[in-house]
Image (cartoon, coloured by chain):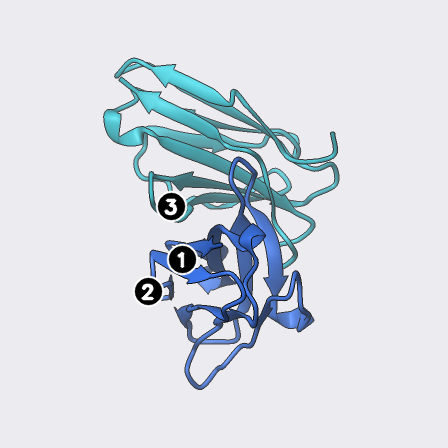
Chain colours: A cyan, B blue
Amino acid sequence: GAGVSQSPRYKVAKRGQDVALRCDPISGHVSLFWYQQALGQGPEFLTYFQNEAQLDKSGLPSDRFFAERPEGSVSTLKIQRTQQEDSAVYLCASSITINTEAFFGQGTRLTVV
Amino acid sequence: AQRVTQPEKLLSVFKGAPVELKCNYSYSGSPELFWYVQYSRQRLQLLLRHISRESIKGFTADLNKGETSFHLKKPFAQEEDSAMYYCALSGIIQGAQKLVFGQGTRLTINP
């Protein structure tokens, strides 16, 4: 399809395990965002890419969180040594530029047990 | 600090009644403001943005810079309007361009 695709849709991880979440943005979209959405909360900004450049990572909650977009297309959000507080839905969005409509993926629901 | 505030977590109105979802923002500059909607089991999607000044699905939102508000309004609610609504702001925050969201309002339209 032509929309933003995220995989996996659901992930259960044991505490301490590393996870990798994938985002396939819409082709040609320069801007890519990652958000964390806890239950009952709005999306919280994690990081922003313009092409392959990570221009803002101020929202990453700890150094266990790492994101990359090496070729300016697919992006991966990696969480090392997962903790229970990492349980949330992780949303990816892409847009043509920063101020245009952001198109969201369906999200990855991460549950850390 | 720049932020978006949606004071109501839950809002319930009857079908045919007017709806107003409140959004206030704090931003030192000229922000871009958006309303996003998430229907049940669907992904978050754009409803409208202030710069386009259009009506989508009967909803309108006017940017009031004096009151720093961007409330979403519809004169006659329909059952299919039941969803989560998020107000969002795009601007320079902490030295970098960001798109930030409010906490969301769950709108329920009763028959």
B15 up-or-down from A28: above or below: below
Can you tell which mark lies on residue A59?
Answer: 3
Provide residue A37's location: percent of width, then percent of height.
39, 40
Looking at the rendered image, the disc whose residue lies closer to the viewer, 2 or 3, is: 2
Query: Do marks 2 and 3 share a subunit?
Result: no
Residue B68 sits in which quadrant?
A: bottom left
Q: Residues within 10 Å of mark 3 (few under 14, many from 20)?
A: some
Closer to the chain start, of discs 2 and 1, is 2
**Quadrant in the picture for the N terminus of chain A:** top right
Chain of the residue where label 3 is placed in the rendered structure: A
Looking at the rendered image, the disc whose residue lies closer to the viewer, 3 or 1, is: 1
Q: Residues within 10 Å of mark 1 (few under 14, many from 20)?
A: many
A113 left or right, relative to B108: left
Q: Residues within 10 Å of mark 2 (few under 14, many from 20)?
A: some
Residue tagged by mark 1?
B102
Estimate the spatial distance between the alpha carbons at disc 2 and disc 1, rounded to whole Å: 9 Å
Amino acid bearing label 1:
Gly
B14 left or right, relative to A96: left
Residue tagged by mark 2?
B7
B46 up-or-down from B65: above or below: above
